[in-house]
Every structure is written in structure tokens, then in C-alpha cells.
Amino acid sequence: MGEHIKESSFGEEERKVFVQHLIDDIQALENMIKGGLVEDDIVRIGAEQEMCLIKDDYRPSPNSLEIIKDVDDHHFTTEFATYNIEANLDPYTLKKDCFTTMEQQLRGLLDKVKKSADKYNSKVILTGILPTISKDELGMDFMTPIPRYYRINEVLTAWRGDDFTVRIKGADELSLHHDSVLFEACNTSFQLHLQIPPKDFIKSYNWAQAISGPVLGVCCNSPLLLGKELWRETRIALFQQSLDTRIWTKALREEVARVGFGERWQKDSVAEIFKQDISTHRILLTKPIQNSSLELLEAGKTPKLEALSLFNSTVYRWNRPCYGVGNGKPHLRIENRYIPAGPTIIDEMANFAFWVGLMAGRPKEYDDMPALMDFRSAKLNFLRAATSGRHAMFSWMGKAMTMKKIIRQELLPIAHNGLKKFNIDEEDINRLLGVIEKRTNGGTGADWQIKNFRELRKQMKLDSAIVQLTKALYKNQQKDIPVHQWKPIEGMVETKDSFRWVSQIMSTKLMKLYEDDYANLALAIMQWNNIHHLPVENGKGELVGLLTWSHIEKFEKLDKNEARVSDIMVKKVISVEPKTEIKTAESIMEKYHIGCLPVCVGTHIVGIISKVDL
């Protein structure tokens, strides 16, 4: 999530000064590129590993601050939520054994954080979206208490002027309002960095956009959110919607989303991309900056372009251009932000080598992407990959091709040549690209999750299914074999000890009635579906009553054609909350001699628990 801002007032005076620094930074960048001051004689790779913390019950564990303090290593930093941690890997020159070296560092850092997590009864898991995250862990009390995160939430919420909305359709459908940006915390990724020479930046950036669809398709690992089976890479939709400040209006107008793929092929220089983003997105964060980048440049010093870097960290392109300074030298790089975390380290390193190989091996005929491919095709390919993963059909250079065919026939040979060009060890090339080839045929992390989730749902309640799935994910990660070799989940048993809360066993697929519905139709619906209890709502969607079989006698005394549900329903309804303990719900039902209890959040019903569930 970028640097932590400790001393900012976020006031108007600071903002005014910041704006001038931002304008100066663009000019300074253009001057450095024109003067040949940006490093162009070396290529480096880097990465950021995001991870989830879970408890022994495989649910989120909100103790990142204690664990980071215990680890005491500058490579680790916080994320939006207190159950996420990020590890920043060192940059390595793209040569020989760089992938093996980076893999060793990543394993070492994960071992380090695992030891600290163990002291706090927590485990570390790598997955695009943690299946066991629930709505409970998306409240403000789970936001990491750091000014930057509060400020982002405060400003985006104010700009939105209303609740954020998440609407994603897949095999299931998720439709939710939420009052903070913390839905973004569901996403964990493995962000890849590649240094690019300034003269080649636009050609490389356009190529990075063109290959995004197929690369994402073979890396998908985020099919589930809040117990719903959605996209193969649900992170793509969720990230955009969780930070979307665009206001819905009746007027037809176009606004660029803060999280997105982009709107066009790029033509001129990296500075043009930054100018586009500054022109289309409001300044979200500011901070005090001491020195003008132009003055530093004139004095022969290398500016950090602090205003531009801070602004850029709040615009979330899936392929994001970045400026940085290393060893006193300025450089440019592309950050690949769409790759999910997990399923294993070997899978992640295979994804990394595949992408870097593709970038490094770009054939000359792909230097001019605007002449070869319509930008909308590249954008649509990315969307298709996110929704359908390995099974997507793409438009590739004017031809319709399956993802499998593009990767096997077009992209793997390019990636192989690209890695050879930088003298990467042949053994590493074959080992890592071999994982991609086998995964193309054998299945991604998303495929494995969906297949096993569906089987578990045939045997057990939703809550048990997502817990068992997460447990299997964790155990397979410890074996450290790539996901295409993972076996189906077997021998999972649902026991009474698995459950504590009402939310874990309640029925959530509800038939509902409205108070002005005709009673004869309501009773017919109950008979047709063999339902004994039906909740009743008003026009605002609030629970106002309950209809049960026992009301048939009351109906018999009324005019059959005129009676409404409101005439025969129970109006004083006893209800419980999702976090009510099951034994409490059971005793309430016994005490009042009732066969069911609506489960409500405020005045809205979210489930129902019956004697059958108990």
C-alpha cells in the first residue's frame, strides 16, 4: 500500500504546495529522460508478497502489528487489514540464478514470519482471496490503525457520497453495500516488478497490456468470496468496485475507474501515462515535501519525485508504471499487479518467470501493438481471463484462440527465448516454465478450489465447506508441490464441534413474502415447496413478520380472496444475530416453543435457523 505518512496534516495549504511539487516532478522526469539520466544499462526484477494470517480454525487472525513487531525485519510492512502482511523482496539483476535466489529469499522471509505468527497462535496462508473471510472481518475495527489507511478510507468515502457497492455475477451472485474501502483487504497478490529502459518503455508497456489476458488466465486463484462462487479471478472485479468513487447518475457520462486496465495504447513516453492519470484522478493523499525536484536536478542530485510517487501509489493500474531510485540512480519499471498470491511459492515463481520471460523476449513484430491489435480486444481478453480463467476464448492478433493454444503455441516459446536472452539457468527455465505448461493442461488454483468446493457443498453446510477448503489449501501449501499436482480433498467430516455461531448453520437461500401479498398465494407457495416458515418483509426490505403452518387455521376464518399475509402473520418476531451462539438460539426456541428463528442484521433478515438445522 506504499509509504506510511507520519506527519501529514492533509490540509489545504499542504495540498496547494503538493500540487506544484507534482507538476515539477513530471517536468523533472521528462528532463531526466531527455538528458539520458535514467538507468538503461541493467535490468532488475523485484516482487511484493502479500499474505493472510489465519487462526487454528482457519479464519482471519487480526494480529499483524504484533507479528511484524516480533519479526523485526524491514522487509515486512502492514496492509489495509490487520490480518494481512506484505513482504518486500530485494531487487535482483535479471541473470543466471536470479529466480532461484529470489525464491530462496521468499522462502526465508515466509519462514521468519511463520515463526513469529506461531507465537500468536496464527498461521500464514497464500491465496488470492481467503475463503473464510466473512462480512464480520470487513468492518472498521479490522483496519490497520495507521493514518494513511484511515485517510484513504475517509477521502474515498466522502467522494463516493454513499455506500460502496459490490455486485459480481458468476455461478453465484454477490450484491452488497458496504461503508468502507476494507473490501479491498480481501485481495492478496504477488506483485511483480521489472525494470525497463526508458527508450523501450512504451513498447514494453503496450506489450505488457497485450499479454495480460493470457497470463492472468493461467494464474487464477481467487474464485470464492463470502461463500459465493464468482469469477475465476474475483480479485479483478472486487478491487475495482471496492475503491470505486464514481457516482451513479442519470446522466450518461464516462469516468475512468481508479482501479483499471487503461483506456488506450500508449504512444509517447512514460511521462504521458502519469499525465493521463493526474488529469483523470483527483489527488487522494498529500504530504509535506522539503525540496523541489527541479532544484535538486539542477544541483546535480537525483530527485525521488516524492509527490509523483505518492500520487501514483493511489492509482491502481493493473500494469502500473513506476519511478524509483536505487543506489542513487533513477530507474523506470512496470509493476504487474494482477497476479494473485499462491497457491504455492513454486507456482508464484513460475508465474514470475513466465511474465518476465514474455516481457524480455518480445519479438520485434510486437513492437507496434496499435498496428496489430485493437486495444479493446486486449482489455476484453483481460476481462474474459478474470471471469473464465483457463477456459477463456481470446482474440489474439485478429484470430480467435483458446487460452491454452495461445500459451502453448505463442507465449511459452517467447518466454523461453526471453529468459535465455538474459542467460537464466536452463534448469530454472525448464523447471518454472514447465509448471506453466502443466498447469495450462492440468488446472489452476481457481479450478482446484471450485471443483473441491462444489464437492464439499454436496456433503456439508456452506461454512463447513469453506473452512475445510481453507484447511486443505493450507496443508497443500506446506507440501510445496505445484497446484496442478494437488489431489482432490478426501475424508473431510462435518462434526457438531465444528459449529459455534448461528451464521455457520443457518439457511441463507430464503423464500420471502411481502406483507401485502395475498394469503392464499403465500400458503400455496409454502405447500408447493414444503416450507414450514416464511419471513415477511415490508417494501423497504425490513423484517416485519413470520408466516408458519399454524396460521392456516386463522386463514380459514377469513375471506379467502381478500386476506393478506399481514392479516395472518406473527408480527412480534423473535430473532437472533449471525454471531448468536447456537446453544443460545436452541434455548430460545425451546423456551418459546417455536420451530424457527430469523437471523437478522439490524432490521434485515440474512438467514433463518430451524430445528432441522439444529
Image (cartoon, helix red, strand yellow):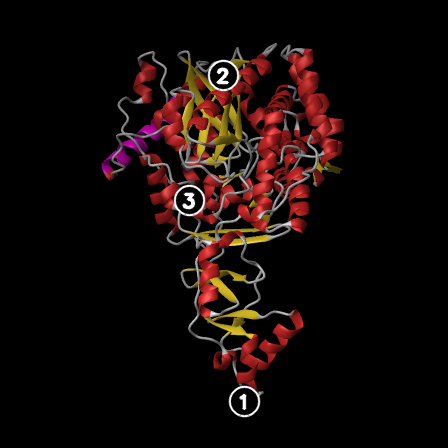
Disc 1 marks a residue whose amino acid type is: Lys
The disc, 3 or 2, on the residue closer to the chain's N-terminal end is: 2
In front: 271, or 602?
Answer: 602
Residue at (60, 11) in percent of width and height: 97
**x, y (%) of residue 538?**
46, 71
Disc 2 marks a residue whose amino acid type is: Pro
Residue where numbered disc 3 is placed: 181
Residue where numbered disc 2 is placed: 91
Residue 191 drawn above or below residue 399: above
Q: Is residue 278 left or right of residue 496?
A: left
Q: Would you call the spot at circle 2 few (<14 residues within 10 Å), some (14-19), or many (20 or more)?
A: some
Quarter holding residue 425: top right
The disc, 2 or 1, on the residue closer to the chain's N-terminal end is: 2
Disc 3 marks a residue whose amino acid type is: Val
Q: Is residue 269 left or right of residue 356?
A: left
Q: Which mark is residue 557?
A: 1
In front: 507, or 424?
Answer: 507
Callout 2: helix, strand or loop? loop
Residue at (54, 87) in percent of width and height: 562
| Residue 473 visible to an observer of this rendering | yes
Callout 3: helix, strand or loop? helix
Q: Which residues are magenta?
A: 13-28
Residue 392 drawn above or below residue 584: above
Q: Would you call the spot at circle 3 few (<14 residues within 10 Å), some (14-19), or many (20 or more)?
A: many
Quote the CA–CA distance across marks 2 and 1.
Answer: 80 Å
Residue at (46, 59) in percent of width and height: 585
Q: Is residue 409 left or right of residue 280?
A: right
Q: Please identify the quadrant where the N terminus is shown.
A: top left
